[in-house]
Image (cartoon, rainbow, N blue to C red):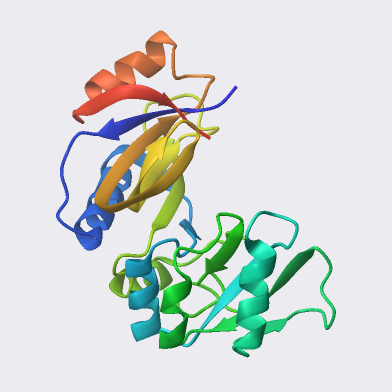
Amino acid sequence: MSSTLYRVRESFPDAPSALTRARAISRDLADWTSCPTPRMEPVTTAEQYAYALSAFDTARIYGNQAEPGVGPCLDELRRRTVVTFDKEEPYSWFAGYAILRPDLTDLWPLPEKLTLTLDSTSPFGDPYSEPDPDSTEEELDDMVSVLGPLSLNVNWDCGWRGLSESKDCGVQLCLNSVWTRQIAVPSPGEFGVWISLGSRVAWTPEGEAWLRDSGLPLGEPQQGW
């Protein structure tokens, strides 16, 4: 069974204020908190690409040439000599790097199954990063400081004070995104904080009492991770 998430019904004007609130909740209500696990969402809109172009030089690109629209778009990127592949002759599935240039703006939006992401670009990551690696709080501050309209989701595992079980308990932060059923999806200009209770405690008297006593203004339960 998955965890249960509850949105903190507070509004945040920007990413730093939402980050500050997420940290305050874990500091006030948890006995322990893990390192943050940030996850960059792909660059999907022309606005995001314009921002990425102004702030970064390269991005990771990957996809499947068999998917609709991906092959022709990839051929155009080749023609403009802006893409290099991890393998010299990529098969249907491919991965590589794209140079960000103003003359690529006309290609947006990219085909749905062609992914351009900054998760291997500093400060969000590097070419040797594992998928969704943990970060330090200082590294997370650096990410948020240059986020702009890009989407970033962050999770901390927590041991909520007073609960006998901590599995799948934590804080979920969504920046330029929103939590839906088991996943965060891009939502430009929206910043939110959720708390999570694991399946072993979420619907027990213990868990319900903890939610009530937390003092947080919480929304309706949502299916978590």
Position of 124 with respect to 173 (left or right) is right
For the point 41% across and 33% down, which residue is it? Answer: 196
Q: Nearest the camera: 137 or 103?
A: 103
- Provide residue 103's location: percent of width, then percent of height: 44, 86
User: Quadrant where the N terminus lies?
Assistant: top right
Q: Is residue 215 above or below residue 188?
A: above
Q: Nearest the camera: 82 or 219?
A: 82
Q: Is residue 163 above or below residue 143?
A: above
Q: Is residue 115 above or below residue 58?
A: above
Is residue 113 in view? Answer: yes
Q: Where on the picture, by quarter, is residue 221?
A: top left
Q: Nearest the camera: 203 or 28?
A: 203
Is residue 129 in view? Answer: no
For the point 66% across and 69% down, which residue is it? Answer: 72
- Provide residue 180's location: percent of width, then percent of height: 41, 34
- Provide residue 133's location: percent of width, then percent of height: 58, 62
Position of 153 with respect to 133 (left or right) is left
For the point 53% across and 21% down, which residue is it? Answer: 199
Position of 132 with respect to 105 (left or right) is right
* View extreme (bottom): residue: 81
Count of marks overlaid on the render = 0
- Provide residue 110's location: percent of width, then percent of height: 51, 64
For the point 23% across and 50% down, which residue is it? Answer: 21
Q: Where on the picture, by quarter, is residue 77?
A: bottom right
